[in-house]
Image (cartoon, rainbow, N blue to C red):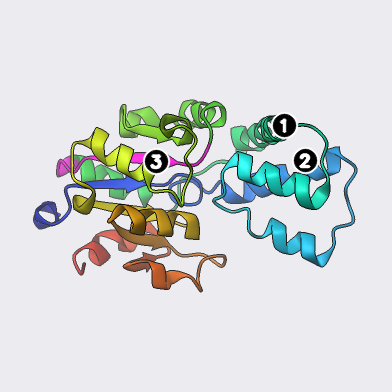
Amino acid sequence: MNDLKQKIKAIIFDMDGTILNTEALWDLSTKDLLQHHNITNISQEQEEILSKLTGMDAIASARLFKEYFSLPGTLEEIAQLQDAMAMNHLKTGMQFIHGFIAFQKKLVEHGIPHGVATNTRKTPFMFIIEVMKLDNLFGEHLYCVDDVGNRSKPDPALFLFAAEKLGVKPEECLVFEDTVHGFKAAQAAGMKCIAIQNETNKDLLHYVHGSITTYDHAEELLKKL
């Protein structure tokens, strides 16, 4: 790990689906949101829209809900309702991705700065920080889309902001991500990117510099970059 510090000055992690297994829980909140509005029969087109929500910010998701499911209320009201429904699932269902804690401990031991940069909005983000004690792992380096005026990935703003706060140049950062929005944001920021591979992104790995399924293989992969 010591020799990695010569190539990588800092690591930025996405959160949902990258360090925490929260994607399925957000999917449950989507089902809750639609059921709340008595939507149970979903067309094939609507199913395809739902499959694109992974990694999307709350307002963009709300816009799709309004356009394709005709949900009432403002975009902000729709987003707030889904946030509230998500927190019901998040409070009991979250776990760290396999191997992450051991990998993060190595980063601390070798003095490699690291932080979180997520499209999740501030209210659910603060809730997740509290439940999972993320501040014990990342200190103050916990950043969400609110920190950059809601300029969500694939805009590179959030990754560039995190790099600045970590005190390194963008090209000195490595990103761990799991969605195409994050892959494109890292690319636009000039950062190398490692994918946490899953069924949703397995055909999109041409955007990244490598992939792992668990953090057990992270250090080995980083040495090959």
State which tag comes first along the sequence, 1 or 2: 2
- Which residue is under mark 3? 117
Q: In the rendered view, does 107 fall on the left or right side of 120? A: left
Q: Quadrant of residue 15?
A: top left
Q: Quarter of the image for the C terminus: give it.
A: bottom left
Q: Quarter of the image for the N terminus: give it.
A: bottom left
Q: Is residue 117 inside the magenta stretch? A: yes
- Which residue is under mark 2? 33
Q: Name which residue lies at 72% across and 29% down.
A: 77
State which tag comes first along the sequence, 3 or 1: 1
Using the image as rendered, state which of residue 52 and residue 214 is in the foreground: 52
Q: Name which residue lies at 63% across and 51% down.
A: 24
Secondary structure beneath label 2: helix
Looking at the rendering, the stretch of residues picked out in magenta corresponds to 109-120
Q: CA distance from mark 3 to mark 1?
A: 23 Å
State which tag comes first along the sequence, 3 or 2: 2
Q: In the rendered view, does 143 fall on the left or right side of 199? A: left
Q: Please report contact status of discs 1 and 2: CB closer than 8 Å, yes or no.
A: yes
- Which residue is under mark 1? 81
Secondary structure beneath label 3: strand
Secondary structure beneath label 1: helix
The amino acid on which the numbered mark 2 sits, given as a three-letter code, is Leu
